[in-house]
Amino acid sequence: MYELERTQRVAAPRHEVFEFFADAANLEQLTPPELGFEILTPQPISMHPGTRIAYRITLHRVPMTWHTLIETFAPDDRFVDIQLKGPYKLWHHTHTFADAPGGGTMLGDHVRYELPFGPLGAVAHALFVKRQLRKIFDYRERVMVERFGA
């Protein structure tokens, strides 16, 4: 089991930032273009516990589908998405939103994930997956600063 933790402060109010994340259509903006991210679920998508969303991504020219379930949805506070089908053995992503001291919003991400294929998955994590996830979250951080300010 691996974990990824990220925090970021943006200048916009919590409600506004949460609304941006709660609109599944914005996921494409938050994903690096080289992943060819595409939402397959018809839009608009109503976010609530039990919402299922299907995506397509392309990784090294290999297309794959990813199905997630919104496990928890607490407006302006947090939501949790879990992978039902996709490249991971386990994916559990908690997004948190809090008022930042002095104004703005603190975004938090806590991802617990596991790779398939046992020892081969561990090698893939060390050689590729860990770096790829950091790159994806670094990209998202830049997008959020451009959209909402630091």
Image (spheres, grey):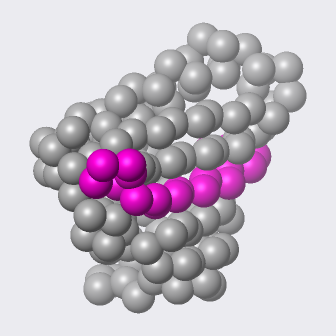
Image-quadrant location for residue 14: bottom left
Please state if 7 lies on the left or on the right of 36 as rendered.
right
Which x, y percent locates residue 115? 73, 36
Q: Nearer the viewer, residue 60 or 35?
A: 35
Q: Which residues are magenta?
A: 87-105
Q: Nearer the viewer, residue 15 or 62?
A: 15
Question: Which residue sits at x=71%, y=42%?
Answer: 113
Which x, y percent locates residue 66? 53, 58
Quadrant of the image containing the C terminus? top left
Please state if 55 lies on the left or on the right of 80 as rendered.
left
Q: Nearer the viewer, residue 36 or 45?
A: 45
Which x, y percent locates residue 149? 16, 44
Residue 52 in view (yes/no): no
Residue 125 in view (yes/no): yes
Which x, y percent locates residue 87? 62, 45
Q: Measured along the vertical axis of the image, is residue 114 above or below residue 70?
A: above
Q: Is residue 74 magenta?
A: no
Q: Is residue 97 magenta?
A: yes
> How many numbered discs?
0
Image-quadrant location for residue 34: top left
Question: Which residue sits at x=40%, y=59%?
Answer: 99
Question: Which residue sits at x=40%, y=77%?
Answer: 41
Quadrant of the image containing the N terminus? top right
Q: Measured along the vertical axis of the image, is residue 65 above or below residue 4?
A: below
